[in-house]
Image: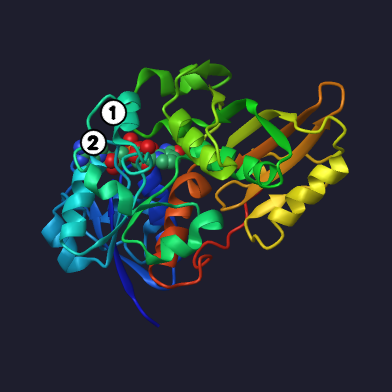
Amino acid sequence: MQTINVGLVGITGYAGMELTRLLAGHLCMRLSMACSRAESGRRLGDYYPFLHGMPGADVVISVFDAHEAAQQCDLVFLAVPAGTAMGMADALLRAGVKVVDFSADFRLRDPGVYAQWYKREHTCPELLPQAVYGLPELYAHDIAKAKLIANPGCYPTSVILGLHAALQHDLILCEDIVVDSKSGATGAGRKPSVPTLFCEVADNFRAYGLPSHRHTPEIEQEISMLAGREVRISFNTHLLPTNRGILSTIYTKLRRPESTLDEVHAAYADTWKDSRWIRLLPKGSLPETRFVRGSMFCDIGLVVDKRTQRLIVLSTIDNLCRGASGQALANANLLCGLPVETGLETLAPLP
Ligand SMILES: NC(=O)c1ccc[n+]([C@@H]2O[C@H](COP(=O)([O-])OP(=O)(O)OC[C@H]3O[C@@H](n4cnc5c(N)ncnc54)[C@H](OP(=O)(O)O)[C@@H]3O)[C@@H](O)[C@H]2O)c1
């Protein structure tokens, strides 16, 4: 069997931790480089005791160096903050290494929009045209030919997958979409901060970042492309007192007020009939974060509210697996000519 050597920069973060877990069970990919500045010099198996005796445990954590990466890796995952990833990606691509970037650095097509929302100039806008937005259900063909993948954001993954069928079948009015998203605390990353301390998050529920969460332009860009015209959304985020999981409740207006749940459900079933990871729930069932935990599934529930003429879409994913590392691995599989599901066929652990 072919062995693909991969590197992971940002090994100590939550996304890096999740990808380390997934790679340990991957039959073809071998973690040959693991980077962090703070933990450089440590054996990975000592830093992550869950890796004891597993592939990757003997890798020694190092500080990122693009030339070292080119010698050791066929592909590098960048699980580092936005603003840091773009310079690393540029150096890796110049050295002939494929890149899957977890950050927002290559997701927005327009560097002006990036500067406006991320409060910094893009340092390599010339790379943006070659970056492929890594949603495997929609762009598998382009992903397979790419050298640079912009792995989607966690909230955008839940919203785009939730709305795609409604847009494809022209079921809703694009003028009036309100997204109410909730995420577990790992969505904020592992860097210590007061708002994510246990006592601030546990036994509490609060909104944050309204009305200007940075994922707004990414969702609008992708939804506009699917709709074939410019779409604005109202996007509102909340922090759940859980480790993982995103539940997005998406309120839309039906284009035809007389549309029934049967019709809408049939349209969604048609869009997702060949998808292994998008699970359209039976009519009357609503998704829960615990059933997608640690998996690639996106569970979608539909509600038609006749009284208000709304289609309400509920879309849930695991932010770390489907919303970050699992999706990155699916993209890497496609980039390397492997079946997209390689190493990703897990179900949620329950309870
Ligand atoms: N958490 C999620 O649910 C989620 C979902 C989708 C996408 N993402 C994206 O994935 C990326 C990682 O997120 P995360 O939640 O894992 O963040 P995190 O927990 O804060 O970890 C960040 C990692 O990047 C490294 N790092 C930070 N600054 C760096 C720098 N200047 N140079 C090199 N390495 C640096 C850190 O290690 P050292 O400081 O030791 O170098 C750490 O390993 C981000 O772009 C994030 O937006 C996260």
Q: Residues within 10 Å of mark 2 (few under 14, many from 20)?
A: many
Disc 1 target residue: 115
Q: Nearer the viewer, residue 224 or 284?
A: 224
Q: Say left or right for 283 vs 238.
A: right
Q: Residue at x 52, y 61 (%)?
A: 344
Specify the quadrant of the image occupied by residue 107. top left
From the top left corner, tell me how far across and down residue 317 is, in percent: 59, 43
Q: Residue at x 81, y 21 (%)?
A: 308
Disc 2 target residue: 122
Does any portion of residue 38 appear in the rendered image?
no
Q: Residue at x 61, y 51 (%)?
A: 297
Q: Amino acid at mark 2?
A: His
Specify the quadrant of the image occupied by residue 22. bottom left
Secondary structure of the residue carrying tag 1 is: helix
Q: Amino acid at mark 1?
A: Ala
For marks 2 and 1, the one nearer the N-term is 1
Q: Residues within 10 Å of mark 1 (few under 14, many from 20)?
A: few
Q: Nearer the viewer, residue 228 or 157?
A: 228
Q: Nearer the viewer, residue 74 or 242?
A: 74
Q: Residue at x 52, y 43 (%)?
A: 225
Q: Are marks 2 and 1 in contact (CB under 8 Å)?
A: yes
Q: Measure the alpha-carbon separation of dots 2 and 1.
A: 7 Å
From the top left corner, tell me how far across and down residue 321 is, in percent: 50, 49
Quarter of the C terminus within the rendering: top right
Quarter of the N terminus within the rendering: bottom left
Q: Say left or right for 223 vs 274.
A: left
From the top left corner, tell me how far across and down residue 169 is, in percent: 71, 46
Q: Say left or right for 121 vs 273.
A: left
Q: Is mark 2 within 8 Å of ligand 1?
A: no
Its colouring scheme is rainbow
Secondary structure of the residue carrying tag 2 is: loop
